[in-house]
Amino acid sequence: MMYGVSQLGYLVASALFIFALHWMNTPTTARKGVYAGVAGTAMAVVVTWAEPSVVHHLWIILAIVAGFIVGVPLSRVPLTAVPQRTALSHAFGGAAAGLVGTAEFYLRLSEGAEALSPFRMVALLAEVLLGYVTLTGSLMAAGKLQEVKWVPQRPVTYPFQNVANLTLLGIGIALGVAITLQPAASWAPLAFAGVIVLSLLFGILLIIPIGGADMPTVIAILNSYAGLSAVAMGFVLDNKLLITAGALDGSSGLILAIIMCKAMNRSFTNVLFGAFGQVQQAKASGEEQVYKAETPEGAAQVLEQANLVVIVPGYGMAVAQAQHKVRELYDQLKKRGITVKFAIHPVAGRMPGHMNVLLAEADVPYTDLVEMDEINPDMPQADVALVVCANDVVNPAARTDKTSPIYGMPIIDADKARSVFAIKRSKNPGFAGIDNQLYFSDRTWMLFGDAKNVIGELVKQLAGGSGMH
Amino acid sequence: MDIWPTVYVFVLASFIGLGVIRRVSRLLYTPLMSLTNAISAIAVVGSILVTGGDYPTRIRLLGAIALFASMTNIVSGFLITDRMLKMFKTDKRGEGKPT
């Protein structure tokens, strides 16, 4: 009877999770998705807590209270910090899976080796491996995103890096196979501890060679790992809710990672083992190229005459906290009857969808946030493309220059607009360290300076101008 | 334990996941991530069983830490997802509720 009730509860929770994700297909229903998710989780917690095998309650209550104490502030972080918060929560998810797996192993071991069938043992090892790799890998990623001092920002590479990493993984898997074959052996607990240590180490080494521009993909992959570790836990506990929820999370991470890779024209293996973010060797180009700088006054005059303005935001907009000024500019232009659209590249920012959230926070209507594929056909009609600290995602070399490391990457065709204003903090190349031909085009004028100040100036010019009429 | 029903569930759930996620609005990828994060914190189920069972203290301690980690993800994941989704409006500040 009790079994039936709990299984029914898990089934309903699974259905609620599927609805939760289904409702994310449009912003109008998305919040319903959150409520469905909360309902599903609450139901699962209650049903599990009511299990007859759960006899001690104090620690459960304490852990739940502690979870609230830490969880609530973590949900209030500024939106620029959402990528590292996400990475951190992947780490928590990985830790939970790894710890439960560890507890299960030593528990079953004390019950005798029969409790550790090969299938269960493999599931346990997968849970522990994925869990601990996700834990340290995500902590590294969070550290890089937060720019913590002792975590190197730039990719760290050394000779035989991939060989060393794969050897480490190989040793871990060999230990796992040995334990699976002989779980009763006296060395099994020690070997299991070895797997844990190797997993923790492997997680760190996996992320060390990855640079900031690849973070959207890496976060998506870690998301997938966190989901798969929950699936493995489901196999260990024979719990179908865990398997369903984990599979949903796993496929979500996978799809996002694939989308991110496509948006950079790179493969999975290339992101994980390619160490792309290194500074590329400066290409020896014969001629000296010169920028044309423009003042905010001049730019404001051109903007005023435009019919269609396309704003291309990049991660630098978030760094400069310029999204609210951008919104003011948007208002000023809209007031003049000018059509303003935002062109969003899939990998702009430090995680999938980052730019959309930042602009939504600044109250830009989401109907004016346009995907790359939809805006590109309109770019030749745009009178002005305003590039706000975006670099690689508007670099025409991706279309034309076969020798460029970003060749083949889909870009926003800012260079096809009638005129281009590019806001840039300094004359240094962007994250990937590649020179951007767009800046030297005869239709492009540079606005050097901090994005927040430059756009603030533009707004002031436009506001002042309208006052005189 | 018969493993095949569980494997079935996994494969079918993955197909559902791929189908559902593919339709998610591209605007919402960041909230999607925090939502799936909170959902996969369903590892809370395993943590409760380990923490609350009649097991040695050190085993239950591992469970309690795991429970704390999952619970943090559940609370912060759902709250921040809702906070972000509230910001997506169709037009003009103040007016728009996303419904």
Image: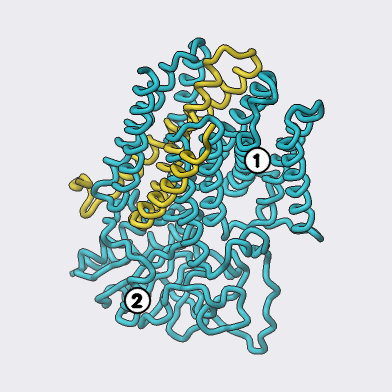
Chain colours: A cyan, B yellow
In this view of the protein, which residue sits in the foreground, A57 or A215?
Answer: A57
Where does residue A430 sit, x and y in percent of width and height?
Answer: 57, 67
Q: Secondary structure at mark 1?
A: helix
In this view of the protein, which residue sits in the foreground, A42 or A452?
Answer: A42
The residue that disc 1 covers is: A129
Does residue A306 sit above or below A12 in this rendering?
Answer: below
Does residue A300 sit above or below A12 in this rendering?
Answer: below
The residue that disc 2 covers is: A384
Where does residue A264 sit, x and y in percent of width and height?
Answer: 52, 67
Residue furthest front as drawn: B2
Q: Amino acid at mark 1?
A: Leu
Residue A183 is left or right of residue A69, and the answer is right
In this view of the protein, which residue sits in the foreground, B86 or A35?
Answer: A35
Label 2 marks a residue whose chain is A
Q: Is residue B74 visible?
A: yes
Q: Quadrant of residue B27?
A: bottom left
Q: Quadrant of residue B25?
A: bottom left
- In which quadrant of the rendered image does the C terminus of chain A lie? bottom left
Q: Amino acid at mark 2?
A: Val
Q: Is residue A135 visible?
A: no
Residue at the image position 26 percent from the left and 56 percent from the top: A365
Label 1 marks a residue whose chain is A
Residue at the image position 43 percent from the left and 69 percent from the top: A387
In this view of the protein, which residue sits in the foreground, A301 or A343?
Answer: A343
Q: Quadrant of residue A109?
A: top right
Where does residue A79 sit, x and y in percent of width and height?
Answer: 43, 45
Label 1 to label 2, Cα distance in Å? Answer: 51 Å
Dot 1: within a 10 Å radius of its alpha carbon, few (fewer than 14), some, or many (20 or more) residues?
many
Does residue A453 sit above or below A130 in this rendering?
Answer: below
